[in-house]
Amino acid sequence: MYSIPCVIFAGGKSSRMGEDKALLPFGGYDTLCEYQYRRLQKFFSNVYISTKNPDKFSFNAKFIVDSSDVFAPTAGFTAIYEKLDAECFFVLGVDMPFVDESIIASVVEADTKRSDATLALSHNGIESLCGIYHRSLQPYFESMLAKGDHKLRKLLERVRTTLVPFEQEEAFFNLNRPHEYQKAKEVYAIIS
């Protein structure tokens, strides 16, 4: 079990889904977010959920509330740095239910103290919500949020980012649209 904190990003607008994807049923749980929370608790000793509104969830969890009116990961990261007293933390998007223990282990093992971020690299490119962020990036996120600059990839190109390549295309499947949610449920039914 990893001592590094894990944070599930579940504070987005879900505009492409048309409804809050964190609240969609998945994997035998009432919500995708609870599915992610319960499975990640098997790998990390401390799991948190980054959200704008913890009251929307019907299960007990540790929440990091992003009270900003900005719907972007930069706001979530800023809230995480304020809340957690940790040198680094692992993040995973709520909409990535197939990132498994082997991927998490590879990212954790590749991380070094010299890295500002250690992230998965898939066929999609840099998976900015699947990896480790260090406290060294806190001032960058605070500055980006203040300026309204929310381009994570631009930041990751400027800092010491370690990329861990993966071939497993299906592991980085994102649930952004209704047809992707349906496909993910079908895949889950096959693999479970």
Image: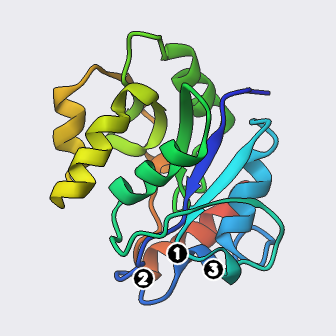
Q: Which residue is mark 3?
A: 23
Q: CA gap, disc 1 to disc 2? A: 9 Å
Label 2 SS: loop
Residue at 49% over, 15% down: 110
Q: Which residue is mark 2?
A: 17
Relative image position of residue 85 (x, y in whole percent): 62, 34
Relative image position of residue 2 (x, y in whole percent): 73, 27
Residue at 66% over, 67% down: 33
Quadrant hosting residue 125: top left
Q: Amino acid at mark 1?
A: Tyr
For the residues labelled 1 and 2, say whether their Cβ atoms are less than 8 Å apart.
yes
Relative image position of residue 152 (x, y in whole percent): 25, 47
Sequence-first tag of 1 and 2:
2
* Image depth: mark 2 or mark 3 in front: 3
Label 2, residues with CA under 10 Å away: few <14, some 14-19, many ≥20 = some
Sequence-first tag of 1 and 3:
3
Is residue 95 placed above or below 87 in the rendered structure?
A: below
The answer to which of 67 and 180 lies nearer the viewer is: 67
Q: Look at the image and tell me in which quarter the C terminus lies.
A: bottom right
Is residue 154 placed above or below 145 in the rendered structure?
A: above
Q: Amino acid at mark 3?
A: Leu
* Image depth: mark 1 or mark 3 in front: 3
Q: Which residue is mark 1?
A: 181
Q: CA gap, disc 1 to disc 3? A: 12 Å
Q: Amino acid at mark 2?
A: Met
Q: How is the image coloured?
A: rainbow
